[in-house]
Image (cartoon, rainbow, N blue to C red):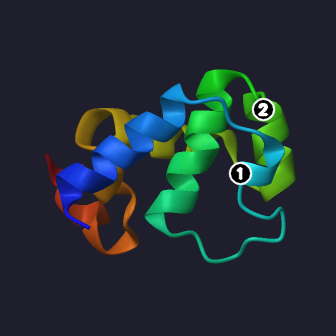
Protein backbone atom coordinates (compact mmCIF):
# COMPACT_ATOMS: atom_id res chain seq x y z
CA UNK A 1 0.00 0.00 0.00
CA UNK A 2 1.41 3.38 -0.97
CA UNK A 3 1.63 6.35 1.39
CA UNK A 4 -1.33 8.09 -0.31
CA UNK A 5 -3.42 4.91 -0.06
CA UNK A 6 -2.56 4.68 3.64
CA UNK A 7 -3.61 8.28 4.22
CA UNK A 8 -6.84 7.74 2.29
CA UNK A 9 -7.52 4.58 4.25
CA UNK A 10 -7.00 6.37 7.58
CA UNK A 11 -9.18 9.27 6.43
CA UNK A 12 -11.93 6.88 5.39
CA UNK A 13 -11.76 5.13 8.76
CA UNK A 14 -11.93 8.44 10.55
CA UNK A 15 -15.10 9.39 8.61
CA UNK A 16 -16.92 6.05 8.99
CA UNK A 17 -18.48 5.13 12.32
CA UNK A 18 -16.06 3.12 14.43
CA UNK A 19 -16.86 0.78 17.30
CA UNK A 20 -14.66 -0.48 20.13
CA UNK A 21 -14.24 -3.69 18.14
CA UNK A 22 -12.42 -1.71 15.44
CA UNK A 23 -9.77 -0.54 17.91
CA UNK A 24 -6.54 -2.28 18.82
CA UNK A 25 -6.60 -4.53 21.86
CA UNK A 26 -5.98 -2.75 25.19
CA UNK A 27 -3.03 -5.13 25.60
CA UNK A 28 -1.33 -3.76 22.46
CA UNK A 29 2.40 -3.32 22.93
CA UNK A 30 3.54 -3.05 19.31
CA UNK A 31 2.26 0.22 17.92
CA UNK A 32 2.27 0.17 14.13
CA UNK A 33 1.08 3.29 12.29
CA UNK A 34 -2.37 1.89 11.49
CA UNK A 35 -3.08 1.15 15.17
CA UNK A 36 -2.01 4.65 16.19
CA UNK A 37 -4.22 6.12 13.45
CA UNK A 38 -7.19 4.05 14.66
CA UNK A 39 -6.83 5.37 18.21
CA UNK A 40 -6.56 8.97 16.97
CA UNK A 41 -9.65 8.45 14.79
CA UNK A 42 -11.59 7.01 17.75
CA UNK A 43 -10.79 10.08 19.84
CA UNK A 44 -11.67 12.39 16.95
CA UNK A 45 -15.04 10.68 16.49
CA UNK A 46 -15.82 10.77 20.19
CA UNK A 47 -15.78 6.99 20.59
CA UNK A 48 -13.16 7.47 23.32
CA UNK A 49 -12.22 10.59 25.22
CA UNK A 50 -8.54 11.49 25.30
CA UNK A 51 -8.43 10.43 28.94
CA UNK A 52 -10.13 7.09 28.21
CA UNK A 53 -7.75 6.38 25.30
CA UNK A 54 -4.73 7.15 27.47
CA UNK A 55 -6.02 4.92 30.26
CA UNK A 56 -7.02 2.09 27.91
CA UNK A 57 -3.63 2.02 26.17
CA UNK A 58 -1.32 3.24 28.97
CA UNK A 59 -0.38 6.34 26.97
CA UNK A 60 0.56 9.78 28.17
CA UNK A 61 -1.48 12.74 26.94
CA UNK A 62 1.68 14.02 25.24
CA UNK A 63 2.16 10.75 23.37
CA UNK A 64 -1.42 10.73 22.10
CA UNK A 65 -1.14 14.39 21.14
CA UNK A 66 2.08 13.70 19.23
CA UNK A 67 0.27 10.97 17.25
CA UNK A 68 -2.59 13.35 16.47
CA UNK A 69 -0.23 16.13 15.39
CA UNK A 70 1.90 13.84 13.22
CA UNK A 71 -1.18 12.39 11.54
CA UNK A 72 -2.72 15.80 10.86
CA UNK A 73 0.48 17.41 9.61
CA UNK A 74 2.10 14.57 7.66
CA UNK A 75 -0.31 11.64 7.33
CA UNK A 76 -0.09 8.04 8.46
CA UNK A 77 3.54 7.67 7.37
CA UNK A 78 4.61 10.06 10.09
CA UNK A 79 3.34 7.59 12.70
CA UNK A 80 5.93 5.01 11.68
CA UNK A 81 8.67 4.80 14.29
CA UNK A 82 11.35 4.60 11.62
CA UNK A 83 10.21 7.94 10.17
CA UNK A 84 9.93 9.99 13.38
CA UNK A 85 13.21 11.85 12.98
CA UNK A 86 12.44 12.85 9.41
CA UNK A 87 9.05 14.33 10.31
CA UNK A 88 10.21 15.94 13.56
CA UNK A 89 12.96 17.80 11.71
CA UNK A 90 10.45 19.46 9.37
* Quarter holding residue 35: bottom right
- Tell me the residue that label 1 is attached to: 22
- Can you tell which of label 2 and label 1 is closer to the viewer? 1
Residue 71 visible? The answer is yes
Graded by Cα atoms within 10 Å as few (under 14), some (14 to 19) or many (20 or more), the crowding at tag 1 reads few
For the N terminus, the image quarter is: bottom left
Does residue 16 appear to the left or right of 54 in the view shown? left
Camera sees residue 87: no
Q: In this view, does 42 lie to the left or right of 53?
A: left
Q: What element carries label 1?
A: helix
Marks 2,1: beta carbons within 8 A: no
Relative to 9, is 57 above or below? below
| Disc with the residue nearer the chain's start (2 vs 1) | 1
Q: Name the residue under label 2.
A: 48
Residue 19 appears in which quarter of the rendering? Answer: top right
Count of marks overlaid on the render = 2
Q: In which quarter of the image is residue 8?
A: top left
- As drawn, the residue found furthest toward the left would be 90
Amino acid sequence: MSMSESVNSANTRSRSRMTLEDLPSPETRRWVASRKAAVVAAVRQGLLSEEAACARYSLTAEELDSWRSALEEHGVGALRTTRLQLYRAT
